Image (spheres, grey):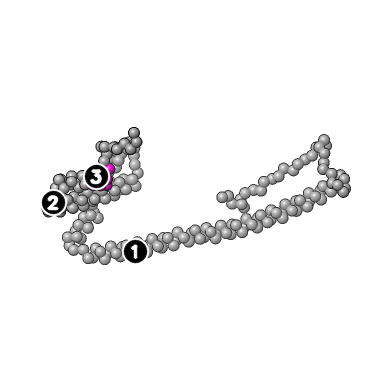
Amino acid sequence: MADPARIKPEAKPERTTSANEERPKSEDTGDVPATAKPAEKRESSSQDQAKEEGKADMAAGEDDEEGSASKILKVEPEKKKERRQKVDEDEIQKMQVLVSSFSEEQLNRYEMYRRSAFPKAAIKRLIQSITGSSVSQNVVIAMSGISKVFAGEIVEEALDVCEKWGETPPLQPKHMREAVRRLKSRAQIPNTKYKQILFH
């Protein structure tokens, strides 16, 4: 919605009457004398000025309201930032408590999980070969993270398969293949070779 203070009032074109047009006659006085016209213009101009001043006052009031609204809007993000910082601090504290209770083996596994990452150059090359265009660094970072999560889900499922079969780690290719098969059957991995046609 546009700010009323910034909208220019529309200039109303004054209607000029030609000599051929009939002027409306007042019932009591007949034709209005030529000297009365400037007085009417003065009265209308003073009324216009009063209206414009009223509009300016209203616009100033609205500007004050908008200013306070913008102050409120500025305060809200600050509150959100404070909440985020508080939540982040709480999460960091919880993670510290959790990590401090890890055993030696769990701590080593957690460190390896944190350090592991797919090489960004390889991910970038793969994305560019599929899309045929260059991609930004943010896209590469996002795809690297998604790939890490995907690989983690497969490994987790493969560990479950290994346990159900009564075998012990290390994981073997048969565990990985069974994990992928199970995830596909649950529709957690898209099947790219077969596409189901919904409508004929």
Q: Tell me how far mark 3 sits from mark 2, CA to CA.
A: 19 Å
Q: Is residue 143 left or right of residue 57?
A: left
Q: Tell me how far mark 2 sits from mark 1, CA to CA.
A: 42 Å
Q: Quadrant of the C terminus?
A: top left
- Residue at image position (51%, 60%) is 71
Could you tell me which secondary element the residue under label 3 belongs to? helix
Q: What span is colored magenta in the figure?
A: 183-190
Mark closer to the chain start, 2 or 1: 1
Could you tell me which secondary element the residue under label 2 belongs to? loop
Mark closer to the chain start, 3 or 2: 2
Q: Which amino acid type is marked by label 1?
A: Glu
Which label number is shown at residue 173?
none
Return the residue found at the far front.
Answer: 200
Return the residue found at the far top.
Answer: 200
Residue, disc 2: 165
What secondary structure is the stretch in magenta mostly built from? loop
| Visible residue check, residue 32 | no
Residue 197 at x, y percent in the picture: 31, 36
Residue, disc 3: 184
| Visible residue check, residue 165 | yes
Circle 1: is it few (<14), some (14-19), or many (20+) Cα within 10 Å?
A: few
Residue, disc 1: 89
Q: Is residue 165 left or right of residue 40?
A: left
Residue 137 at x, y percent in the picture: 33, 46
Disc nearest the viewer among 1 and 3: 3
- Residue at image position (52%, 58%) is 70
Circle 3: is it few (<14), some (14-19), or many (20+) Cα within 10 Å?
A: few
Could you tell me which secondary element the residue under label 1 belongs to? helix
Return the residue found at the far left.
Answer: 167
